[in-house]
Image (spheres, grey):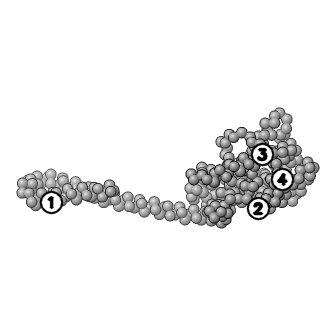
Amino acid sequence: MTRQVAIGYVIATVGLVLALADGLLAPVSAFWSAHSMLTNVVASGIFTIVTVTVIEGWLRNQERHRRAAEAEQERRRLRIVRSVAYNAVARGPIAQRRIMWFLLHGGELRPVPEFRVSDGYAAELRAILARLDLPETSEHDVMDHVADRPCSTARFDVLALDRHWRSLVHDVLLDVVHSFRVLVARWSPLLLTTEEGRHTLTDLAAQVEELSAVFVTLGGRRPVSGSAAGRLDAHRDLWRRAFANAVAMEEKLIDLGGERHTDGRRFTTPGRALLPPTDLARITGRDAQEAPLLTWRLYDGRDSSPSLAVP
């Protein structure tokens, strides 16, 4: 029973009692007649209570309608964001994943609109890999299970000590970060129209800043060798986490876009095959979680996990 209904029953009961007392009980009727001021106060009080109850009920009903209308508008905006913006901004993490793999392992690089690597940069990378006697492995062969995932740790440790490779990474990722920021800025007005979109925008901004930290720390003029192996470990770990976050963000954005599904319910990116066991276990472990995730990235800036070796 709602509060308004209970008050209505009380008022009706009081009114009925007063009416019966006035009509059937002469002493009571005489009392009300002899005390006109009290009669007016009681009548005014009953009228006030009825009026306030009716108005409060009307206001509550209007509030329910307003909230229902706002919820429907939110659902409509969310459908638009999911059908347009998510699939568009997913190009950022996809390009990040493809380019980071290409810089480390070579192979075929499929271009993403707005994130093209020049032929000159590609030729320079292949020359560096050949000089260091590092074979190339296409990410598509790994995702199609045609080739095994190569050891990322050993390759990174060799390449990170090469000044020309670090300089190339700096230049390539500098362009990628710029294009990523332009892409996010272009779709920010639409993403900001929904609460879910605002969380997405926060994750995208963190993604861009993390990628920016990668090319800054691997700048060609910054020596990686020298004082401690810990510096190399830190750089490798930063690279690994940024790559894993790109895979996780790509998967979630495409899933939210709703254009593709792999198991009838949600999209699972083939890019998972590119992850080392530690990160693969982390992303698959989140699949069973029912609670809403605070972030779709596997790692954030507050994550203090120690550097993990990539087999």
- Report which residue position mark 2 lands on: 112
Q: Nearer the viewer, mark 2 or mark 4?
A: 4
- Residue 33 in the image: x percent, y percent? 9, 56
- Residue 89 as seen in the image, left or right of residue 232: left
Crowding around mark 3 (Cα neighbors within 10 Å: few <14, some 14 to 19, many 20+) is some
Q: Secondary structure at mark 2?
A: loop
- At 86% from the left edge and 48% from the top edge, which residue is drawn? 165
Q: Which mark is residue 96?
A: none
Crowding around mark 4 (Cα neighbors within 10 Å: few <14, some 14 to 19, many 20+) is many
Amino acid carrying label 3: it is Val
Disc 1 to disc 4, C-alpha distance: 92 Å
- Report which residue position mark 3 lands on: 310
- Report which residue position mark 1 lands on: 19
Amino acid carrying label 2: it is Val
**Based on the displayed image, in which of its 4 quarters is residue 145 positioned?**
bottom right
- Residue 161 as seen in the image, left or right of residue 6: right
Q: Earlier in the sequence, mark 4 or mark 3?
A: 4
Q: Secondary structure at mark 4?
A: helix
- Mark 4–mark 3 CB contact (< 8 Å): no
Q: Earlier in the sequence, mark 1 or mark 4?
A: 1
- Residue 60 in the image: x percent, y percent? 38, 58
**Based on the displayed image, in which of its 4 quarters is residue 21 positioned?**
bottom left
Residue 113 or 247: which is nearer the viewer? 247
Q: Quadrant of the N terminus?
A: bottom left
Q: Secondary structure at mark 3?
A: loop
- Report which residue position mark 4 lands on: 105
Q: Secondary structure at mark 1?
A: helix
Disc 2 to disc 4, C-alpha distance: 18 Å
Residue 30 or 311: which is nearer the viewer? 311
